[in-house]
Structure formats: structure tokens, C-alpha cells
Image (tube, grey):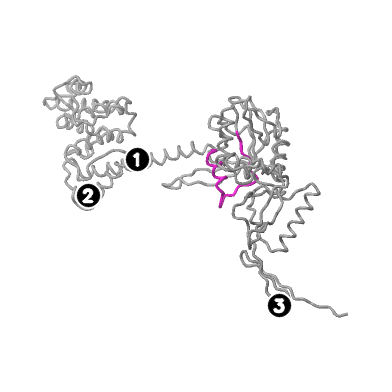
Amino acid sequence: MLSSVLEFKISITDDLVQFSVGGEMVLEAYDVAKDLTIEEVFVDGQDEPVPVAKYLNSDRRGFAELRLEHETAYLNNNPILRCAACHQPVVPRRQKNKDTQLRFFKHRNPHSDQSCPYKTSGGVSQRQIDAMRYNGQKEGRDHIRLKGFVHRSILADSSFSDSQVESRWWGEVNPEKWKKPDVSAVRDGLRIAFEIQLSTTFMGVMADRRKFYLENNGLLVWIFKSVDKEAPRQFQDDIFYNNNSNIFVVDEETEQLSEERKELVLRCHYLEPILLETVIAERWREKLVSFSELTVDQPNQRLYYLDFKEVEARLREELTAAEDAELRERFREYWAAQGLHLNNKEKGDWPAKWRQIVKDLGVRGINLPMSLPDYDLARFSCLVLSISHGKCVGLRHSPGTILQAANYIFDSCKDMLWYFADLLEKTEHYRQINEQDKASGAKKRAAGKEHHGWDEKWPVVKAIYRKKDPTSPQKRAFDALYIFLVDTVGPVPQKMVNSVSSSYWVS
């Protein structure tokens, strides 16, 4: 008996199936339906929905095998794929459309097909679809496993009570609304919802759950299987950065430690701000922490081990203080070199140094002209620096005593005595002035010379400071700069900060 042998070849290019029988090429076109009724599906044992095209883009043999596999699994009450929105079993189907065979997934139960938001156009919002897809993730093995870790760990901690798995949490604000957290428990009178997070959760779903638990006096805690530090997905960043840069993981070790310590233990991954010279950097830290070590911030729906924002703010204050101190020193060096009469203001690199000082002050909201300083600014600067440092800075007596500085200021800067008096009150350098003045007076009297001491001058200064001398109007154009320069001397009265005048003259 003779037998005939036919050569059979098949290949796929894009959406065209090519096969040959006996050397003759036969073409059959197929396509994945463009207007998909079901866009994504959950795979049995996995936690993240996948596009249906992943399963529909196969050759005829693969598609036929896929169909048999699904039918067999369904008969064994273990469907392989479920709709990402309604979680009902789906099956692969094919339908002829002109010259093309369309492939798509269809709900196994025709009744569920009518209630699924993928089928009912306009009846369900995208946010509701996203929420249903999120709930579908709870069918995965990892989700169930992590849920067990959390529940058993809480049961080991006597500070928690009423631990429940997937129990409805009814709203207090709106009794018709409810959520079903993976695990819920009560600690110190606060009801806490633990939600397992394994894959993409849409921001709308996250925000909706956060709002619900906040309105109903609860706390939402997200739990992860692992943390990707190199290339995190957006949903991880959304939770991580909004939880003060702290994120929690559970695993076999955390469950074991919870049982050993008799308290809930979580693996906390967090960012620690650090100061590297003049830059605030961040580094990853990991620590096994007990729940009692964590800070509960229910109004902001946060639970954290390290207060990232507080540490960052403290480092920023330290960095700002260091930068301010360095700028004050550059300001002092400039006036110590220039002197009251600005003898070197146009020489060497001094003009460039001044422009940089003005620029750096401008960043702090202190506006000075970019042009070289005038005589009023010179008098003010030398006055403040001399009294602050307790010796002459930039004055004609430099280096000289604070008494010499005070005498010059009283004689040549009467229109700025308010700054002088305020600084003396903060520094108490008036004691040095009195001591030096007393010694100077004794020498003059011993030499038979006349001495007009500060006993005669203090009433004049005090009258100006208390604005009781209308004959001596004060220039107060430099209040903002004054506040900055005296920061290290002592606190500036709040009333002064609040009443910095933009007017050049204040009577």
C-alpha cells in the first residue's frame, strides 16, 4: 500500500498566518479585535492584570491549544483567566469578519457579561473599573500568602485586638459606603486597615481608599512583597513618598520575629537624608521594626519609622545656617578691607566679590543695588559689624576698641543710632563701653583734660531708640539687612521683623 506524504509548513508574520501544503502556499489572515470588549485579564496565581493580546497573538495551533486548555481548566473548576474588571472566568473565541478571523475573550457566563463594566458602556466610571481591577488582584497566591503573614503577625501581638481578614468596614460618615481591607485590627482605640500591594494600583483607587479611612477615623497601611530601589514603578512611588518616604514589607522572617517578640514586626525601607558638604543627599535604609517603634499620623494617613521631612528640614536649616554664616563672613571681610571710605572698592576682584554678595543677599530677599555701595551703606555696615564684633571694623580707628567705634558712631552716625542702640541691647557691649569709658576718663582727668563721657551720651541714644527725640530722624532703609547680619548676635524683636519699613526715613 502506497502512502502519500504532504509537506506542511507554517509561519507567522504580524497578523498573517502562512502555511503551505504540498509546496502550495495558502494564506489565512487573523487579527486581534481592535475594539476589545475585555482589555485585560487576571492569570491564575498571578497578581497583576495582563493585556489580552499576549494570549491572542499566536498561530492557529497555539490558539487551538489555548482554547482546549481553558475548557479543561474550567471543567475542573479552576479557570485560568478571569476578567480584570468583574473577575468572572473568560474564554478565547474567534469570529469571522469579512476576510479576517477576529480573536477576543468572552465571559464564560453570559449573564455576568451584561453586568461587567467592560460591557456596559457609560454605566460605570473608569475609577470604578480601576477599583474592581484592584480587587481582582486579591485572588493571587502571593496576595493570599502576604495576607496570612500580616494576620498571623497581628495575632501574636496582644496590643492589637479584633483582627479580621477581608471583613467589611462600614462607613460612619456614609453608612452605605464600605471597604473590605485585606486585614483590619484595632490598636490603642485606632482601627487600622492593612492593604497588600503587589502590582499597579491606580492613583484614583489609592486616593479613594485613603479618603474613606481618613473620614472614618481609621488608618490605611500599605504592605508590599518587596521594594524596587533601582527602577521603582509609579504605584510604589505614589505610596512611598506620600508616606514620609517609608514603606513596609512582610515575609517569613517578619512573621517569625513577630511570634518570637510577641509584637507585630515589619520590614521598613526608608530614605535617610544626609548632608554631603553643601548638598542634602538621600540613602536607602532597611530595618526590622516593631509597630511600637513607628509614628502614627492618622490625620495625614502616614505610618513611619524615620521622620524624613523632619530630618530633611533640620539638615536644611543647618545647611542654610552654614551658608548664612559664610555670607556674613564675606560681608565682614569686604568691609574690613574697604573701610568706611571705600578706598579699594574698584581695585582687583573686589567689585566681583561685592556683586556676588549682593546676589547672595538677593536670594534671601535682601535687595541692594548691584552697583558699588554708597556712603550710607558703608556707614551702616561698619556700624553694625563694629558693635557686633566688639571692636572697630572698617572705621578709621581699625583695629580699635569698641569705645572708639562708639564715639565715632555717636559723632558721625546720629541718623543711624537706632541700629547702634538695638545692637547694644542685644550684645550688652554697652558694659564694655562703660568700662573703657571710665578708664579713659580717669586718664584724661589725671592729665588735667576735660572728658565728656557716655554718662552724658546714653540719654541721647535712649531717646532716639524710644523715638522720643523728633529732632533726630533715623534712616531705616537697611532693616532687612540688619535682621540678617545680627542673626548670630541675638534674636531680633518680632515687632521689628513685622514692621520693617520700606521708607528710607522713619521719624
Q: Which residue is mark 2?
A: 351
Label 1 sits on what residue type? Asp
Q: Is residue 223 above or below residue 470?
A: below
Q: Is residue 117 above or below residue 193?
A: below
Q: Residues within 10 Å of mark 1 (few under 14, many from 20)?
A: some
Residue 241 is one of the magenta-drawn residues: yes
| Disc 2/disc 1 C-alpha distance (Å) | 21 Å
Calculate the distance from the C-alpha at mark 1 to the C-alpha at mark 3.
85 Å
Lower sequence index among marks 3 and 2? 3
Query: Please, what secondary structure does the residue beneath circle 1 have?
Result: helix
Which element is circle 3 on?
Answer: loop
Residue 141 spot, x, y in % from top left? 72, 46
Q: Is residue 37 left or right of residue 274?
A: right
Q: Tell whether label 3 touches label 1 (CB within 8 Å).
A: no
> Which residue is pictured at 22% across the width and 49% down the height?
351
Per the rendered image, the range of residues in magenta is: 220-243
Q: Which residue is tagged 1?
A: 324
What is the CA distance from the residue labelled 3 to the residue labelled 2?
A: 89 Å
Which residue reaches farthest right?
1
Q: Which quadrant is home to the C terminus?
A: top left
Which is more foreground, mark 1 or mark 3? 3
Residue 23: mark in rendering: 3
- Left or right: 143 in relation to 504: right
> Which image quarter holds the N terminus?
bottom right
Identify the element where label 2 is drawn: helix
Q: Residue furthest front?
A: 98
Amino acid on which the number 3 mark rests in the picture = Gly
Q: Position of residue 103 (x, y in %)?
A: 66, 57
Indicate the quadrant where residue 263 lies: top right
Magenta stretch encompasses residue 73: no
Camera-nearest residue between 25 and 61: 25
